[in-house]
Image (spheres, rainbow, N blue to C red):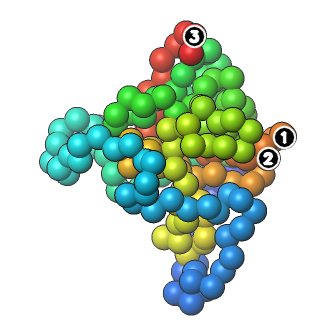
């Protein structure tokens, strides 16, 4: 699997026509989108691009502020097995618990649910979902509810009971070991 993903990493994605993105259904409950400025989404003060560049490493800035992706199998937290909490690298909001982390074999840290999820209710989590058609594929982007940092994507191929795989970039996270 690792060899396949590494080989595919270098291939360009086929661009979808604008009509395909507009008319393609996103259902399954995983495509529920949250738009910038949604009610109930607490936000801190917006920072200028120059301030984000000052606070973050170039790779952190690219992933979190420019919606980039770190190369597969390169992330610091991919094989982390310590108990603790994963926080947003930009604003320090708790996002994912190590208790919900698992090895998906895809090359990025994977979580079955966001911290604060109750059943299927994510209103008390630190993440929002948005429809993302930027790569020519329709996916569900995951962003930090507090600072709007791009974290990764969520897919409907995870383990039970949620069936979700939050595929999150290590550089978008800061791990804090210990109890929650």
Do the numbered discs 1 and 2 sit on residues whose CB atoms are within 8 Å?
yes
**Quadrant including the C terminus:** top right
**Quarter assignment of residue 57:** top left
Residue nearest the viewer, comparing 171 with 127: 127
Secondary element under disc 1, as helix, strand or loop, is: loop
Left or right of residue 14: residue 69? left
Q: Is residue 24 depicted above or below 114 in this figure?
A: below
**Quarter assignment of residue 17:** bottom right
x, y percentage for residue 169?
51, 42
Residue at 39%, 60% in the rendered image: 36
Q: Which residue is mark 2?
A: 163
Secondary element under disc 3, as helix, strand or loop, is: loop
How far apart in space, not on screen, are marks 1 and 3 (Cα)?
24 Å
Q: Which residue is mark 1?
A: 160
Pointer 1 local density, CA inside 10 Å: few below 14, some 14–19, many at least 20: few
How far apart in space, not on screen, are marks 1 and 2 (Cα)?
5 Å
Residue at 22%, 35% in the rendered image: 55
Q: Earlier in the sequence, mark 2 or mark 3?
A: 2
Left or right of residue 17: residue 174? left
**Does any portion of residue 180 appear in the rendered image?**
yes
Do the numbered discs 2 and 3 sit on residues whose CB atoms are within 8 Å?
no
Q: Earlier in the sequence, mark 1 or mark 3?
A: 1
Q: Which residue is mark 3?
A: 179
**Does any portion of residue 110 appear in the rendered image?**
no
Q: Is residue 85 depicted above or below 89 in this figure?
A: above
Do the numbered discs 1 and 3 sit on residues whose CB atoms are within 8 Å?
no
x, y percentage for residue 145?
44, 45
x, y percentage for residue 140?
59, 60
């Amino acid at each position: 699997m690792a060899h396949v993903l590494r080989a595919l990493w270098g291939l360009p994605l086929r661009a979808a026509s604008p009509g395909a993105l507009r008319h393609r259904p996103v259902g399954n409950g995983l495509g529920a989108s949250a738009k910038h400025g949604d009610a109930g989404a607490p936000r801190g003060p917006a920072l200028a691009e120059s301030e984000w560049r000052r606070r973050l490493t170039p790779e952190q800035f690219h992933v979190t502020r420019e919606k980039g992706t770190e190369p597969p199998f390169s992330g610091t937290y991919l094989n982390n097995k310590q108990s603790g909490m994963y926080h947003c690298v930009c604003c320090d909001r708790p996002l994912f618990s190590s208790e919900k982390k698992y090895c998906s074999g895809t090359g990025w840290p994977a979580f079955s649910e966001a911290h604060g999820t109750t059943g299927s209710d994510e209103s008390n989590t630190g993440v929002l979902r948005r429809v993302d058609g930027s790569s020519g594929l329709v996916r569900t982007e995951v962003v930090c509810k507090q600072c709007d940092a791009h974290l990764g994507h969520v897919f409907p191929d995870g383990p039970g009971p949620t069936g979700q795989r939050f595929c999150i970039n290590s550089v978008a996270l800061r791990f804090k070991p210990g109890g929650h």
